[in-house]
Image (tube, rainbow, N blue to C red):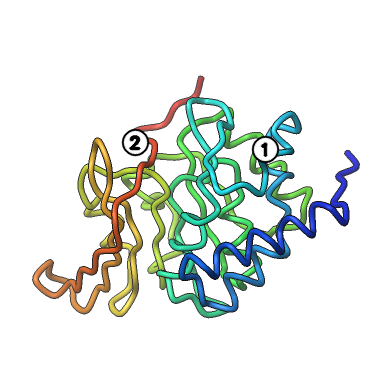
Amino acid sequence: MTRVDSFKHKGLRRQMCEEMRRKGITDPLVLKAMEEVPRHWFIDPALDAHAYVDRALKIGCDQTISHPSTVAMQSQLLELKPGMKVLEIGTGSGYQTAILCRMGAKVFSVERQKGLFDQTKRLLGELGYRARCFLGDGYQGLTEVNYGPYDRVIVTCGAPEIPAPLMAQLKVGGIMVIPLGEEEQEMLRITKEGESREEWKVEKFGTYSFVPMLDGRNFS
């Protein structure tokens, strides 16, 4: 399939990144990745006109692609350095995955919806992003395969609690970025300074609205 990334698309991405700067995004790795990754490739072509507007868009399976500002903020909070191993919970459209790959991360991504998993794994491969994608239960992370511990964990859906298996797979000194809550979520950055919960450093970065985090796999 031939994908077009026109001068217009590139110009709109530059404008989007300027908007991200005004909203407090300063990490040059994040801004460079967001200018380079064509968001319009990760949505329905019928929504092309909205690809670089700061809004969430439906992608099927009752899921959404997050606001660009949300993707940028979560990516910035990770304090990512190239070569780090990142566990992503909620592959979704693959846009956040692609941003992390473009930032130089080694990405391991878990999606529970088989329809999205099949579609997105194929798309990321076609676009040359070398993320490892898994169909699985996001609450459990990747307990069935031994790629951890991870330098970073990012959760891209609203979690009612901090999943213990994900914290167990995060290395000491690592960072988890997770939206916590049910009706609306508070964006947390948790630095794992030790194994016990008392040794976690928790920072809060405002309220957001994500689709809910669900347990188990969905093979339908």
Residue 189 falls left or right of residue 48 = left
In the rendered structure, which amino acid carries the disc numbered 2?
A: Pro
Asked whether disc 2 touches disc 1, contact meaning CB atoms under 8 Å apart, the reply is no
Which residue is depicted at the point 59% across and 41% down?
93
Using a 10 Å C-alpha cutoff, classify the residue at mark 2 as few (fewer than 14 neighbours), some (14 to 19) or many (20 or more).
some
Residue 211 falls left or right of residue 31 = left
Labelled disc at residue 43: 1
Front-lying residue, 198 or 157: 157
Question: Is 183 placed above or below 180 here?
Answer: above
Labelled disc at residue 18: none
Question: Is 23 placed above or below 209 here?
Answer: below
Residue 156 falls left or right of residue 10 = left
Front-lying residue, 92 or 49: 49
**Snapshot quadrant of residue 102:** bottom right
Residue 40 screen position, x and y as percent: 72, 45
Residue 38 falls left or right of residue 200 = right
Labelled disc at residue 212: 2
Residue 174 screen position, x and y as percent: 34, 74
Q: Which sits earlier in the primary sequence, circle 2 or circle 1?
A: 1
Residue 140 screen position, x and y as percent: 33, 47
Which residue is depicted at the point 45% across and 35% down?
112
Question: Is 8 placed above or below 27 here?
Answer: above
Residue 76 screen position, x and y as percent: 46, 70
